[in-house]
Image (cartoon, helix red, strand yellow):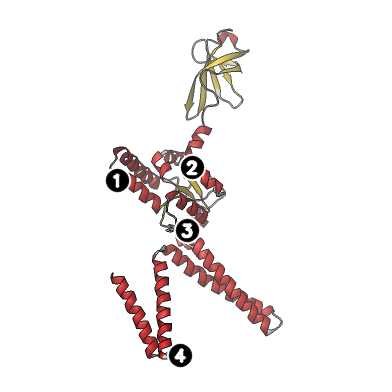
Amino acid sequence: MGILIIRLLIMLSAAAAGYAFPPFGLEPRWAAGVGLALAGLVILLETRIRRTPFKIIWGSMVGTFSGVAMGWILGAVGGLIATDAGTARFLRIVFLLTMSYIGFLIGTRKSEWLDPAFLIRFFKERSVGRAHKILDTSVIIDGRIADLCDTGFVEGPLVVPQFVLKELQLVADSPDGLKRQRGRRGLDMLNHLQKSKTVSVIITELDFPEVKDVDSKLIELAKHMDGKIVTNDINLSKVARLHGLAVLNANELANALKPVVLPGETMRVYLIKEGKEKDQGVAYLDDGTMVVVDEARRWIGQTVDVTVTSVLQTTVGKMIFARCCEDR
């Protein structure tokens, strides 16, 4: 209510000023209307600014002033090489208008480029293959992203939007016990990532008020930052790829790392040496995977058919345990 009264007083004051001090030789009543219209335009601009993040406002101001400066420089250069005064003035006006507009667009659409912290990180950390990776709620709660970062498979910087943090907090405060536990696990994972020495975590307040759902906000943010979305949500992955965005899906990575063979499958191997245990034979696949075959010592130096009994995944690689086929 207070802000409405202030706005009304500003509009009345502007109208009174126009009536008392008519500009441009206008009649007092028309001057009051001009003052009222200008005050309304300012208030309309103020309402739009209130809904716009500070980073975008700051970026648009810096971008516009930078564009004006660049346009003035280019216009001065163009004036030096122009053959007549008319062409020189034309070039100055064109460069001033176009560069101001381009600076405003860059400042609005790429406001993070004008953040000093971003510029420092860009020149300090940016290298081939490194880009912003934007985390969604599902991959934070899942927790495997922390393990991937610890092993060095995922490089930063990792970006966590404020609207994702808000959604995560809502899950952590849920009356449902299971959801509450998942939300708290996600917050613990974020805390772990922030303390990690292998990646840097950026909490961005960049938001898109005109976009309602979180998934659409993530897509817009990825476009804005030219980043990749990290998620476990298959639907978000599909929609993001339709928009031409790069997506890192932890579930797809897990499927890609599944064993190439499963227990019960039959394969043909060449036994080349004895194993550590009694009567074992050892073979190797083309990719270097060791195959340990029980009761196969007498067939060393031969190619045999074996049945896989188990697959062991270790930190140093994968081992396959098998036995010779019964019909041998």
Closer to viewer: mark 1 or mark 4 = 4
Q: Which mark is residue 173?
A: 1
Q: Label 2 amino acid? A: Asn
Comparing 138 with 61, the one in front is 138
Q: CA distance from mark 2 to mark 3?
A: 31 Å
Q: Is residue 63 left or right of residue 82?
A: left
Asked if disc 4 and disc 2 are in contact, CB closer than 8 Å, the reply is no
The residue lying at 40 percent from left, 39 percent from top is 143
Closer to viewer: mark 2 or mark 3 = 2
Residue 66: where, in percent of width, then height? 53, 70
User: Residue beneath label 2, please?
Assistant: 235
Say what secondary structure mark 1 lies in: loop
Mark 1 surroundings within 10 Å by alpha-carbon count, few (fewer than 14), some (14 through 19), many (20 or more): some
Q: Label 3 amino acid? A: Phe
Mark 2 surroundings within 10 Å by alpha-carbon count, few (fewer than 14), some (14 through 19), many (20 or more): few
Whichever of callouts 2 and 3 sits on the residue coming sooner in the sequence is 3
Whichever of callouts 3 and 1 sits on the residue coming sooner in the sequence is 3
